[in-house]
Amino acid sequence: MNNVPMLEMQHIRKTFPGVVALDDVNLTLRKGEVHILLGENGAGKSTLVKILSGAYQKTEGKIILNGQEVEIRGPRHAQELGIGIIYQEFNLVFQLSAAENIFLGRERTNKLGLIDRKQIFESSQKILDNLGVKIDAFSLVKDLGVAQQQMVEVAKALSLDAKLLIMDEPTSALTDLEIKELFATIRRLKKRGVTIIYISHRLEELFEIGDRVSVLRDGKQVGTYPIADMTQTDLIRLMVDRDLKTQFPKQYAKRGEELLRVEGLSRKGVLDNINLQLHRGEVLGIAGLLGSGRTELARALFGVDKIDAGKIFIRGKRQKITSPRDAIMLGLGFLTEDRKSQGLIMTLSVKENVCLPSVERFSRWGIMDLKAEDQAAHQSVQELRIKTPGLSQKVVYLSGGNQQKVVMSKWLCRQADILIFDEPTRGIDVGAKVEIYKLMNRLTAEGTGIIMISSELPEILGMSDRIAVMHQGQLTAEFPAQGATQEKIMGYALGVSNGA
Amino acid sequence: MVPKDFLSHYGRQFGTLIGLLVLMLVLWILTPHFFTVPNLLNVAQQTSINAIIAVGMTFVIITAGIDLSVGSIVAFSGVVLASVLQAGLPVPLAIAVGLGVGLLSGLVNGLLITYGRLPPFISTLGMMSVARGAALLYSQGRPISGFSESFRLLATGETFHIPNPVIIMVLVYAAAHFVLTRTKLGRYTYAIGGNEEAASLSGVNVRLYKAMVYGLSGLLSGLGAIILTARLNSAQPIAGVMYELDAIAATVIGGTSLMGGEGRIVGTLIGAFIMGVLRNGLNLLGVSSFVQQTVIGSVIIMAVLIDMALKKQRT
């Protein structure tokens, strides 16, 4: 590493109408380093990165690239300056091949004006090989795995001669093995002098791949530190500015009457003879691998998908649930795993989202009592400490953690007491996670029952009263959370251990 | 908070209103006759039918749908209404029949779209042809003319010196604004257009409310047919051609997004008036109808271009 910084951002300030997103942020990147950007959702990481990638224009401050001040005018200009970005959601055309994606928009043509396919495929293959990944440039992107698709994105950035690569949550959709491969690729890129800005919420992986870490909090810079000098606890404290005694502040509530009982629930090819119970005041954690039927179970209970067999009892009474509406009327609430496509209506305001399941509560003869609705929304926003400039703010402008709180408040406002949370803390920073856990404590103390589906085993262990494990559409085991271990859960999830 | 809220809700419509006012100012300078009370009332009367149909279109487009069948439903409702009037049915009952035909045609659209899972474009495109054919069949291709004075007064009469169609239009807009902003139907209309899946998972009976919205669009086409028939003293099976495009244009100029989830009824009224004022002004200026079409088309495109540019600036 030489001493001339590759990129310097000085006194960066960015304001949106009514919000200061970034305030006096300074960032210095050394050539060939992996620089971690850390902060809660809404801390300003995305804004900072979007300024670099040309999606936003800074309000104040200087950007110095290789010793020269630059104005990044737009995404195209950023590319020309050698800044590449890989978003969580890929910008790939799935019906085209890897090579066609890599050169999309920059296809070189031959004398006849036709696309020079040979050249495109050969250059692409070379870039992919240099990355050390085994991807055939001819293969269609839709046939590739998520990790490979990500590598196509990386190749695309490198084909543009990127010297600075920004990776936003690159591991969120990868398996452990794929993460190892990604890290190997990152190390190769480092050796070639590529500088990397790395954004992730998975604290443990940062120590493996990062060189230095810059922490942002509420749009301000907390500091930049060599990662080797830090511990996870240090980082969390810097991010949230409060010592989190424990990541999982579980409080045990009194177990009450039975809220929900499922007998022999089946859906052909997806769910096989599921039996479970949920009582007041308890959290039933459901673990299992992707595709084990966890989400499908939630959807079947909530009336989204039809069931072929089985009985559902709510508060002891047998009920037929054939639509989400039925489920909601019976007091169920469903926090879906994908808040953007299933949980929120982005074109609507905080208030309208919060109150959507409760519209009937505020209506008489179809006419709404807007004052009562306002009050209820206001109360929810306060209770959950949703950070928003106002009730009429569109949810699309909120940070991920706050959006998730809006989805939760939908069901609190509805006073649902059988809650199904599918991956309630996915893509949410540590601070917001703890707030959501505390909310779960409060709910169970009030007598709500929660089914919590999660891929994060520590979360399952830390927040559940009982744990059920799914494997290939079956509930293979059920046991108390106290005394359970990650290994035990994994054993059932993988189908290695047999029924309890 | 109130002015800020107002701007965030109606900022787009405010821009359209300024566009309308500038247009009126220009026409006033070019042709002084434009800004006289009789002419302005004339514009309002001419605009009323499109404006009323555009209300239904606005609901439909907010749900991220489209209704291409409104013009044909106007023709079909019109000829059925005319025939029952001539058969001697009392005026109020005949009006109910006219509205009913529109409502039923709209509901058929709604059922095809919800239970039949057809895309709105296809379903209403089919209905556009079916209703037109039905109108021609029913009337055997001939206009049905000559109605009682009491029926014609609906369009030709005045109340407090204001033409009745204008009053009906104002009432429809007041009701539509109320429905969109203060009722369950209105809230669900926005929710369905914004994200149908999330709406359904929040307990909204998406099929029911979608069907209702298409029914409403048909109902208002029926209302348009009543005014048109009363004004012309005749129901034509070929009436209402291109009405769907005028209604879509008014809606879109008024700021309702074709992507769904967003839109204000006031905007549609302003949009309808921009089209009405433009037609009237071009007529006063003696511009040929060929040129008029081109000008109106350009205005639609410009309005949307400006809207998109402004939206981009805001983010």
Image (spheres, coloured by chain):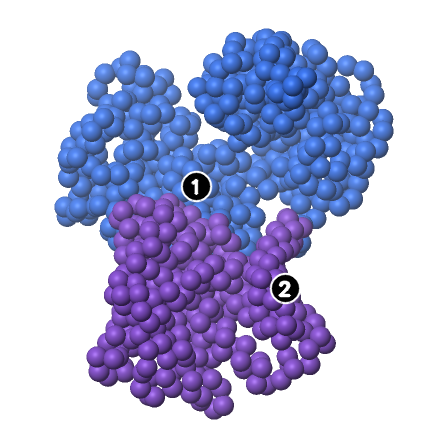
Q: Is residue B106 above or below residue A301?
A: below
Q: Is residue A430 left or right of residue A166?
A: left
Residue at position x 27%, y 57% in the image: B108
The image's mark for residue A341 is: 1
Can you tell which quarter of the image residue B148 is in? bottom left
User: In this view, which residue lies farthest toward the bottom?
Assistant: B160
Callout 1–callout 2 Cβ contact below 8 Å:
no
Chain shaded blue = A
Quarter where residue A132 is shown: top right
**In the image, is B181 to the left or to the right of A28?**
left
Which residue is at 73% across, 32% downward?
Answer: A77
Query: Do badges 1 and 2 share one subunit?
Result: no
Does residue B103 appear in the picture of this structure? no
Mark 1 falls within which chain? A
Provide residue A179's location: percent of width, then percent of height: 51, 17
Screen quadrant of the N terminus of chain A: top right
